[in-house]
Image (tube, helix red, strand yellow):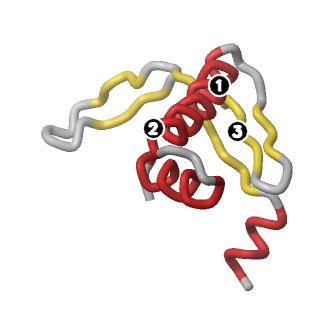
Amino acid sequence: MNNADLAEALATEHGLTKADARKYVDGVFAAITEAAAKGEEVSLNGFGKFKVKDSPAREGRNPANGQTIQIAASKKLAFTPAKAVKDRLNG
């Protein structure tokens, strides 16, 4: 499922035009991205949490030639599903 599929499902279920539904879907993802960029946690009841996690700098290996390289520190967006989602997936 992609953004267009989500928008189509939203449009069908709520009687919206596909264009309006696409704006809403894009708006939700933009809001989540903006909050994550600020370092905020996004918690969606019944769905899960998006958290920003720091990944420290580390050494790695270039698989092509085996040379040691430095991998820079970075931030990653992690998702933790809610219990209801986990239960739905597993049972």
Q: Earlier in the sequence, mark 1 or mark 3?
A: 1
Q: Which residue is mark 1?
A: 31
Secondary element under disc 3, as helix, strand or loop, is strand
Task: Give the crowd class for mark 2: few <14, some 14-19, many >=20 residues within 10 Å.
Answer: few
Label 3 belongs to which residue?
50
Neighbor class of circle 3 (other Cα within 10 Å; few <14, some 14-19, many 20+) is: some
Closest to the observer: 74 or 38?
Answer: 38
Horizontal and vertical percent position of residue 63: 22, 43
Would you say 36 lies left or right of 71 here? Answer: right
Q: Which residue is at the front of the view, 84 or 69?
A: 84
Disc 1 residue crowd, few under 14, some 14–19, many 20+, Cα 10 Å: few
Q: Position of residue 43 (x, y in %)?
A: 81, 39
Query: Disc 3 residue type?
Result: Phe
Give residue 19's mark: 2
Residue 73, position as x, y percentages in the image: 52, 20
Q: Which mark is nearer the camera, 2 or 1?
A: 2
From mark 1 to mark 3, how far is it between C-alphas? 12 Å
State which tag comes first along the sequence, 2 or 1. Answer: 2
Q: Are marks 2 and 1 in contact (CB under 8 Å)?
A: no
Q: Residue at x 31, y 25 (%)?
A: 69
From this viewpoint, which residue is outermost toward the bottom? 91
- Above/below status of 35 relative to 20: above
Secondary structure at numbered mark 2: helix
Q: Are marks 2 and 3 in contact (CB under 8 Å)?
A: no
> Mark 2 or mark 3: which is in front?
2
Q: Is residue 76 left or right of residue 4?
A: right
Q: Quadrant of residue 21?
A: top right
